[in-house]
Amino acid sequence: MDKKITIAQIKEAVQQAYDLYKTNTDGKNADYIPYLANINKNLFGISICLLNGQTIEVGDSEYRFGIESVSKVHTAILVLRQYGAKELLEKIGADATGLPFNSIIAILLENDHPSTPLVNAGAITACSMVKPVGDSKQKWDAIVANITDLCGSAPQLIDELYKSESATNFNNRSIAWLLKNYNRIYDDPDMSLDLYTRQCSLGITAKQLSIAAATVANLGLNPVTKKQVFDAELSPKITSMISTVGFYEHTGDWLYTSGIPAKTGVGGGVMGVLPGQFGISAFAPPIDQAGNSVKAQLSIKYVMNKLGLNVFNGHRVTIVD
Ligand code: GLN
């Protein structure tokens, strides 16, 4: 079925979602990373980036928060750019784990495989693969340059978050060395873990994440800068990985209720990709048991349902003025 949606309708839906959930008090800031525990829990922003480059924003859409696990999408894209789709599949995998983001059992169950670059294990492996292997400084520069390309502007390291997370990332240290044991780390394990921790500590805004999501939705062409960031054929690969594991053990529930592939981070950010239509991001610090922002989930679901959008409903949607 052909369906037309106006920009005014999108603006109205975004504003309604914001008004509806602004005062929601469910969830709790992540407390296993001390910096995140102390962020103002009332911050809340939503941003949509259309494929003409226009953004529709409400609330704290320009507040810089910890990107955390949303960065896994960006670095998976970098690995796809550097190695191609086939090698990512061979070296990391593209499977759902059905388990929490920091699961060690998932590595053991997969028999030595990190499953997907969108959980901690696979993301640490992805950091180990970033070229040039062996050079931490240049690898870091490549990670930041790639995020900058995707967002159309640079992220900024939140130094306090990086220190806070580095001092408490014991579980991730185990993951890095377990992967080394299975020959699934392709550079120095401690350096790979440090790069992962640092990329999680980058400050990003909901507006920036919506532009990165729109770049994926737009087959690699950043709709704001007009730069072709990655080959169009890689876009469905990244969206498929977001679809299968973006909300960890709640990914099925998420897709079923929202109809949009999206990736979360414990900093409270979510980035959703509606292929051929737009990128959407919402940010609010309080998260649920699985580490997913409560208000970001509610607001993105609201917008999707209100506009009758769903990646699975087969509608040919045109967004018009
Ligand atoms: N840096 C966090 C960690 O590794 C990211 C987790 C997340 O956002 N789900 O634990």
Image (cartoon, rainbow, N blue to C red):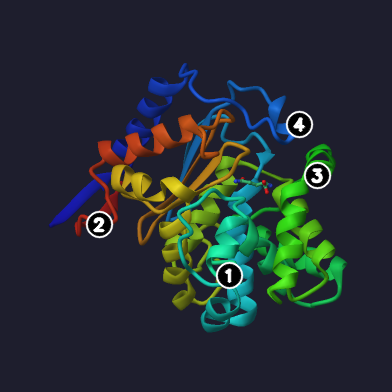
Residue under numbered circle 1: 229
Which label belongs to residue 162? 3
Mark 4 sits near ligand 1, with its Cβ under 8 Å away = no
Where residue 230 appears, as percent x and y from the top left, is 55, 73
Q: Residues within 10 Å of mark 4 (few under 14, many from 20)?
A: some
Are circles 1 and 4 on residues that touch, CB within 8 Å?
Answer: no
Task: Say whether disc 1 or disc 3 marks the residue closer to the N-terminus.
Answer: 3
The CA span between labels 3 and 4 is: 11 Å
The CA span between labels 2 and 4 is: 39 Å
Q: Which amino acid type is marked by label 1?
A: Val
Q: Is disc 1 placed on a helix, strand or loop?
A: loop
User: Would you say 106 lies left or right of 296 here?
Assistant: right
Residue under numbered circle 4: 34
Q: Which amino acid type is marked by label 3?
A: Tyr
The CA span between labels 3 and 2 is: 38 Å
Residue under numbered circle 2: 312
The CA span between labels 1 and 4 is: 34 Å
Task: Say whether disc 3 or disc 4 marks the residue closer to the N-terminus.
Answer: 4
Task: Say whether disc 2 or disc 4 marks the residue closer to the N-terminus.
Answer: 4
Above or below, 242 against 264 in this view is below
Task: Say whether disc 1 or disc 4 marks the residue closer to the N-terminus.
Answer: 4
